[in-house]
Amino acid sequence: MRVMSGKTVTATLLLLSFLLLGVLYCYQNYRVSVSFELNDSRQTDSDVLPLSEEFHLEAEHLRYQQPSILIGRTDVVTVTPWLAPVVWDGTFDPVLLDGLYRPRNISVAVTVFAVGKYIRFLEAFLLTAEQHFFVGFNVHVYIFTDRPNEVPRVHMAPGRQVTVRSVPSSRRWQEISARRMELIQTLIEELRNHKDYIFCLDVDSRFHGRWGTESLGGLVGVIHPGYYRDQRTKFPYERRPESRAYLAPEDGDFYYCGGAFGGRLQEVHLMAKTCRRDFEADARGGIEAAWQEESHLNRYMWIHKPTKVLSPEYLWQDFKSREPEIRLVRFSGVAKNYAEIRPNT
Ligand code: UD2
């Protein structure tokens, strides 16, 4: 048997050490990768990111008409240039939408102001809301009035209720209109975790057709019935640069109503807070925007684009004759004698 020399022994030991280190290295990497895979496959609920209520709508057990991307309304524009839907009759499936939102058990707050003689409009507003507004859903109407004793008793369906809040009377209708944003802001701060959506509506109006889940969105604007055929230069935006509601002739998308707007609580809160802040800053500077909070809302919605736009079906005016594109009037302002009903002219 041949005896190994000292050099050969050293070389062999070195080689064996390298081999051992290599094996250890590979084993370690294998363990790390297996452990990653195990972690991935063992996801628990706490690893799942919270889903947005707005977009996570499940339809597994719903039956509804097959939708088409070829057949639909062609007489009107149904999407804004920033890709927000414009809601018209014939653009949505009410059965599908209600089915999608019902399992979410959503709750909708409504604000309505009935100050001074405007209390006379409240009964018809509430009665028709029971017939058409989010029927079958949780609705809470907040009435702001200086005449709480004159609020009519209207039978509400289960899940629906009214709360009356007292506000001071006013000698100027402009103040009533302007203070709405402040009261909406503070109401939302109270409601924050108890309601999902809010709509702020004019009381001198009635519902004539469905207003429901199709109107839900982050920030929802309603196109004013009086100006949607006009060029933007003709819109009655605030045109004085000294006002914080100012819009230049080349600015603005649509003319939105002050008489109906809404959306998710957080979005409407930000808008109300901003409009109130700007309105008050204007007042300190001795200026009142042409259409009070409606002017500030129009500036806000030009900068912060609504995520859903409701067509004038959602706020028509009784004195206006029907245009061919208005297949259905859902909500409409009643004709009134301003000189008789307002505290000032
Ligand atoms: C337009 C707007 C309205 C508001 C106003 C100007 C639409 C269709 N209407 O309506 O929202 O922007 O111009 O500021 O967009 N109110 C009272 N008591 C009063 C006066 C007003 O409670 O004495 C409340 C009531 O809820 C009424 C709302 O304020 O619905 C708006 O007042 P308006 O209806 O007199 O204003 P109008 O018809 O010019």
Image: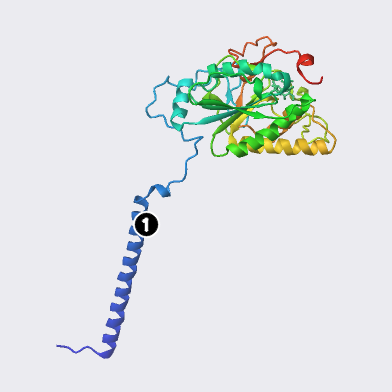
In the rendering, at what x and y percent does residue 315 appear?
Answer: 64, 19
In the rendering, at what x and y percent does residue 316 appear?
Answer: 65, 16
Quarter of image, res 175: top right
- Quick one: 4 or 332, which is closer to the camera? 332
- The count of marks equals 1
**With respect to residue 30, does 180 lie above or below?**
above
**With respect to residue 189, does 21 lie above or below?**
below
| Residue 144 shows in the view | yes
Please report the residue visible at 30 percent of the width from the left and 70 percent of the height from the top: 23
The residue beneath circle 1 is 36
| Residue 220 shows in the view | no
Q: Report the amino acid beneath label 1.
A: Phe
Quarter of image, res 112: top right
**With respect to residue 91, does 107 lie above or below?**
below
**With respect to residue 70, does 11 lie above or below?**
below
Quarter of image, res 339: top right
In the rendering, at what x and y percent does residue 325 appear?
Answer: 61, 13
In the rendering, at what x and y percent does residue 75 appear?
Answer: 60, 15
Q: Is residue 263 left or right of residue 59?
A: right
Quick one: label 1, few (<14), some, or many (20+) residues within 10 Å? Answer: few
Please report the residue visible at 37 percent of the width from the left and 49 percent of the height from the top: 44
Q: Quadrant of ligand 1?
A: top right
Please report the residue visible at 42 percent of the width from the left and 49 percent of the height from the top: 47
